[in-house]
Every structure is written in C-alpha cells, then in structure tokens.
Amino acid sequence: MTEIETLTLRIDGLEMRIAHQDHTIEELSATIADQWKQIEDMTFRLTRLTEQVREVENSAGVTDEPEPPPPHY
C-alpha cells in the first residue's frame, strides 16, 4: 500500500468519525432542549402548586408560627 493510499484511508476514517460525532452532538443538543422545556414546565407547575398550597393554608388559618404550649405546662 502506498503512502497516498494510507493517508487516504486515514482521512476517510477521520471524516467518518467527524460525521458520527456531528450526528451525536445534534442528538444531544435536541435532548438538552427537550429536557429544558420539561424543567421549565415543572418549575411553572411547582410554582402554581406552591401558590395553591399557600392559599389553602391561608383560608384554613394555618400559620408558620408554632402552637403555644397547652395550659397545663
């Protein structure tokens, strides 16, 4: 095998690896974008749920203050 053939084979191998890596990077980027959308949705839902819990606590008279000890103390 000549030096040019060897170099051609090496270049072809590198080009295949780069193409595979480009494809992998695109897949990872799409996955990250999907996960970011899920995180934003979950954050929004958690915020809404927190607000709803606070509303229920306020309407039920629940406070963050500790209960006073019973009179027999």
Image (cartoon, rainbow, N blue to C red):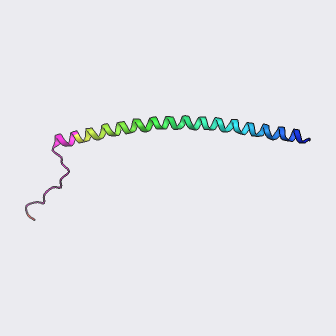
Q: Position of residue 20 (x, y in %)?
A: 68, 37
Q: Quadrant of residue 53?
A: top left
Q: Position of residue 32 (x, y in %)?
A: 52, 38
23 relative position to 32: left or right:
right
Most extreme residue toward the bottom, as rendered?
73
71 relative position to 12: left or right:
left
> Which portion, as a residue range, is magenta?
55-71
Q: Position of residue 34 (x, y in %)?
A: 50, 34
Q: Quadrant of the N terminus?
A: top right
69 relative position to 40: left or right:
left
5 relative position to 23: left or right:
right
Provide the major secondary structure of the magenta segment: loop
| Depth check, front residue: 39 or 57 | 39
Q: Position of residue 67 (x, y in %)?
A: 15, 55
Q: Quadrant of residue 3?
A: top right
Identify the residue shown where x is 8% and y is 63%.
Answer: 72
| Depth check, front residue: 61 or 3 | 3
Q: Quadrant of the C terminus?
A: bottom left
The relative height of residue 72 versus residue 59 in the rendered view (above or below) is below
Identify the residue shown where x is 59% and y is 35%.
Answer: 27
Most extreme residue toward the left, as rendered?
71
Identify the residue shown where x is 70% and y is 38%.
Answer: 18
| Depth check, front residue: 44 or 73 | 44
| Depth check, front residue: 65 or 4 | 4
The relative height of residue 3 versus residue 64 in the rendered view (above or below) is above
Q: How many marks?
A: 0
- Residue 66 on the magenta span: yes
